[in-house]
Amino acid sequence: MNIVSFISKQVPVSEKQINKTIELLNDGATIPFISRYRKEMTGNLDEVEIGEIVKYKTAFEALQKRKESVLTSIKEQEALTPELQKRIETAQTLSEVEDLYLPYKKKRKTKATVAKEQGLEPLAKIIMEQREEEILFVASRYINDTIINEELALQGARDIIAEWVNENEKIRNRLRRLYQRRAAISSAVIKTKKDEDEAQKYQQYFEWEEPLHKCPSHRLLAILRAENEKIVRVKITVPENDALDIIDDVVIKSNVEACTDQLFLAIADAYKRLLTPAISTEVLNQAKEGADANAIKVFAQNLKQLLLASPLGQKRILALDPGFKSGCKVVCLDKQGGLLHNENIYPHPPQRETTNAIKKIKSLVNAYKIEAIAIGNGTAARETEAFIKKIPFEGQIQVFMVNESGASVYSASKIARAEFPSYDVTVRGAVSIGRRLADPLAELVKIDPKAIGVGQYQHDVDQIKLKNELDTVVMSCVNSVGINVNTASAPLLSYVSGIGDKLAENIVNYRSENGALASREQLKKVPRLGGKAYEQAAAFLRITEPNNPLDNSTVHPERYKLVSKMAKDVGVSLKELIGNKVAITKIRLQDYISEDVGLPTLTDIVKELEKPGVDPRKKATVFEFDPNVKTINDLKSGMKLPGIVNNITNFGCFVDIGIKESGLIHISKLANEFISDVNAVVQLNQHLMVTVMSVDLSRKRIQLSLVD
């Protein structure tokens, strides 16, 4: 089995496409670069397909590494036969490898190893042969100072047989299939925890049972979280008689009662003591892996939508981090997000210095020529919004509510301290709120995605897989938008294809020492940014107002000569070609096809020439909540309210309706027809008009609906 055939069984693309993609990956190319600039090589694979190839490439490499380790171990024991070696080398899964390795795996002292040390293995073999009718007499031959009677001898033999049954590959595979079909998951509350306040959120799982394969990912993760918090005990079970029948069918080969009686006892012991714990754990882990994958997928979708949220663009922004007792922190930012001014105002109780606060805000708006106001959506947000909207500004100032999830994490981070070493966390948090309005992507990349407040059970899933997937999403978003190399922060630059943390710092340092870069070509002067990094990164980095207009486009520098030829062929200069639809329509793509440039790349180039450097994100728009709803106590069933989707899960979406608590639209209330994918109906940050179905004041839960 080679890597290409392994991947081709999982990813529905040709082996040639897989092979070429692997070549590019092994050469250091990134997913965004391959999908955008090597379409001819891969047969026009997109990021998702390339990502799947990367996923199974990693799985194959892990499988091969484990095979090598297992083969080495068995070889050291001088137990490796050609047949066993071939079976291990051709194994398709890790579980298959582990089953083959199990009999040779170094064990701690077990009942079976003790029995073998006592010389009872021959007796176990005699019983397994199932021909001896006088097994009690045979067992008497093994009596000694340690084994004082026949029953102890038979018990030891059964212990050995139980281990053999446990290590039988056929039995384990048949049991796995039974578990896949018939396994049930059940949970029961630990009695001492039943009345604790923390346990009540898991009340529905105090006595719960359902088929494991029907248990949705969010419920499985919730049950396992309850188990981790020692609120419930979880069991995985199958019909015991069916499981024992499977083992009997493999082991029992005769009707010699003296032997089969011993085997039935050994089988029952093997099933209860060895196989049930092992297979149950394995099956539960597989279900958990599936639930993790599902939750990670949901989180990744949410994160992508959040990162690609509408930016306001380069505007002079006044940002407020609202508060009551501590006041509202106010900062003024320039068009590049630089901090110009900060102070506190106290428009709310207990100080209620409203008149003074109005004067300060008006003065700051005029002094810094503010174009928009950003208000964090935390404590006192609605009150602060109402206060700001009452101020009579000289010009029209747009007011935006900004999701501040994770701002406090950023404000205390190493990145924030490096950016604002002379300011405290309150200033940094307010700056983050303002910058999020201008460019969500540029600001959110500075925060651990898990702190942003989207997804489901992100702290319960495999953290390595979660990080890898989220890093891939962030890189995809950053490269799909394109980055201004002269204004981007080091964290943002680090996600550009081929850059990474160290080169990002080098670019920032180079800018500080030499001023703004005038061209993409100048990137080659950045220390340690070699040819490979330049190839991967250059087209994703933008130079605004460049000498060569292609430096502010997605056209790769390796195609600049080709585009210049296009311009010459249609009789215009390169600058005149950019955005010139009349001239662009004269370009005959067939004339420029070569060995390494095909129609996919040429089509992309022409599309970019029509609208170079266009940000694919929509522009930010003002949203207003219902002014009459300030707290959960203001809600009534049947009310229709404007809201913003702020989280998406497999079971529905949560909607911000302008109060502390978000409401849930269950998946069954998203549309009049059956819906299997929440993302097919709603998107993160989408503006909705929802209906209040019910309000549970004691549990602070709000049920909403999109259907009549």
Image: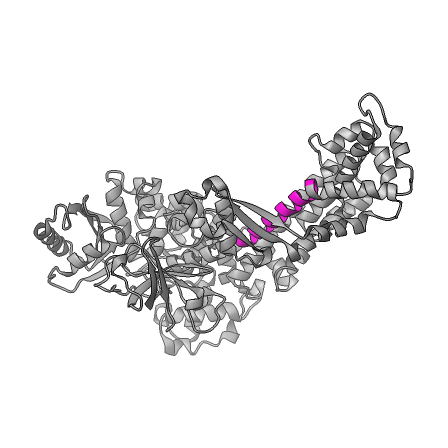
* Residue 654 position in % (x across, y down): 37, 59
| Residue 27 appearing in the image | no
**Most foreground residue, 4 or 85:** 85
Magenta stretch: helix, strand or loop mostly: helix
Which residue is at the far top? 145
Residue at 54% in and 71% down: 593
* Residue 29, position as x, y percentages in the image: 53, 53
Please say whether residue 287 is one of the residues in the magenta stretch.
yes
Magenta stretch: residue 594 in it? no
Front-most of residues 322 and 480: 322
Q: Is residue 315 shown above or below 602?
A: above
Which stretch did the figure color magenta? 273-291
Tell me if residue 20 comes above or below residue 159 in the rendering: below
Name the side, left or right, on which 534 lies relative to 160. left
Q: Position of residue 548 (x, y in %)?
A: 36, 61
Front position in the image: 116 or 570? 116
